[in-house]
Image (cartoon, rainbow, N blue to C red):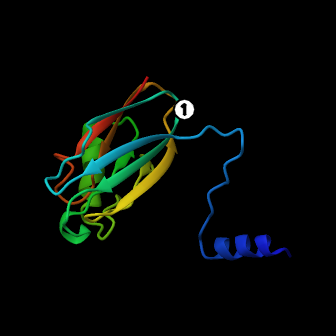
Amino acid sequence: MKLRSLLALALLTLGVTAAPALRADDPVPREIALTANDAMQFSLAELTAAPGEKIALKLTHVGKLPKTAMGHNWMLFAALPEAEITKLLMDAMKNAPDYLPADRSSILARTKLLGGGESDTVVFTAPAKPGAYPFYCSFPGHFAMMKGKLVVK
């Protein structure tokens, strides 16, 4: 076997899958910069995208506190009733250290949980259907203040 095949087999055995490489004809993702701070605020409450647009969202935690005290993430959900998303976020609060709901089927994209000075980028494709898609921080107690929407139009 070639070395590349062996590496791929080893990664699959460990449960790791590699992201597919970009091809020359793939669209370059549009970059969106978003910050979160120690006052539990995102820098933007509304983001926009075209249907099916490829997005690279970079979340930067500009605060100083560690993620155990003031962690932040960005989680984009399917267009669900607010009560359903609230149930998912309430479930996420009991799932330390990443604070992810047990049912992740409604999460369209997410960053990892960040502490002060850290950043993470998630590349995703905006939904094909126009509408408003909510995003939140799932750290315990944050989702009431740290929320917004991705408007696909």
Q: Is residue 148 left or right of residue 17?
A: left
Q: Position of residue 65 (x, y in %)?
A: 19, 67
Q: Is residue 103 left or right of residue 7?
A: left
Q: Is residue 112 left or right of residue 62?
A: right
The outermost residue toward the right is 1
Q: Secondary structure at mark 1?
A: loop
Q: Position of residue 34 (x, y in %)?
A: 32, 46
Q: Residue at coordinates 33% horizontally, 66% vertically from top-left?
A: 98
Q: Position of residue 15 (x, y in %)?
A: 59, 71
Q: Residue at coordinates 44% horizontally, 48% vertically from top-left?
A: 109
Which quadrant of the figure contains the N terminus?
bottom right
Q: Residue at coordinates 30% horizontally, 67% vertically from top-left?
A: 95
* Residue 2 seen: yes
Dot 1 alpha-carbon crowd within 10 angstroms: few under 14, some 14 to 19, many 20 or more: some
Q: Position of residue 123 (x, y in %)?
A: 50, 48
The amino acid type found where label 1 is placed reads: Gly
- Residue under label 1: 52
Q: Is 138 rendered above or below residue 48?
A: below
In this view of the protein, which residue sits in the foreground, 59 or 103? 59
Q: Residue at coordinates 48% horizontally, 27% vertically from top-left?
A: 50
Q: Is 82 rendered above or below residue 66?
A: above
Which quadrant of the figure contains the C terminus?
top left
In this view of the protein, which residue sits in the foreground, 61 or 70? 61
Q: Is 92 rendered above or below residue 144?
A: below
In this view of the protein, which residue sits in the foreground, 91 or 56? 56
* Residue 102 seen: no
